[in-house]
Image: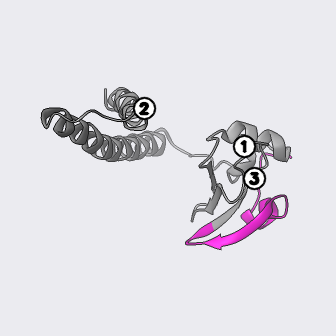
Amino acid sequence: MSSGAGMCADLLLTRLEGVKRSGTGWRADCPNGHRSARGTLSITQVEDGRILLHCFACGDVGGVLRALGLEASDLFPERIKIPTPEAQGAARERFKRNAWAAALRVLDREACIVAGAARAHLDGLSLPPSDIDRLALAIERIGKARKVLA
């Protein structure tokens, strides 16, 4: 597609299979060709027109877009030009605050994972491999959040 003007969620949904309403958005089968594709793709269109996609099985938004013949720009409404340097600075500051808020939410959630693992260790419990993998993911996410906050 890549017209630069973005698309509405209704048009995107016509390209997907197994579409069902879910909360404020939809769930569909992931078109990326993995085995556990049923209902794993989450689609939400937010107030500003952006379309948010996430596959809970593969996590590969780029692969999902390629399978649909789309580009990332197709998920966003046409870019709005900011007229003045002051308005650009204010927009950058809002973006930075939003990024910080998101990073702090990640830190809060992932710190709970680390704390739970530490408690289990102090209690003499050994973590199963799946919990060790989740702990490694938490550490990776904390590192990424720290970069945003730096």
Give the residue pinned by disc 3: 6
Residues at badges 2 and 3 in contact (C-beta under 8 Å)? Answer: no
Q: Label 1 belongs to which residue?
A: 73
Question: Which callout, 1 or 2, points at the residue further toward the start of the chain?
Answer: 1
Quick check: 5 above or below 113?
A: below
Residue labelled with disc 2: 133
**What is the secondary structure assignment of the residue under circle 2?**
helix
> With respect to residue 28, does 117 lie above or below?
above
Residue sitting nearer the eye, 47 or 9 = 9
- 98 or 32: which is nearer to us? 32
Reply yes or no: does residue 24 show up in magenta. yes
Amino acid carrying mark 2 in the image: Asp
Residue 71 seen in the current view: no
Left or right position of 65 against 104: right
Q: Secondary structure at mark 3?
A: loop
The x and y percentages for residue 29 are 74, 57
Which residue corresponds to the image point at 75% horizontal and 53% vertical from the top-left? 6
Labelled pair 3, 1 in contact (Cβ < 8 Å): yes
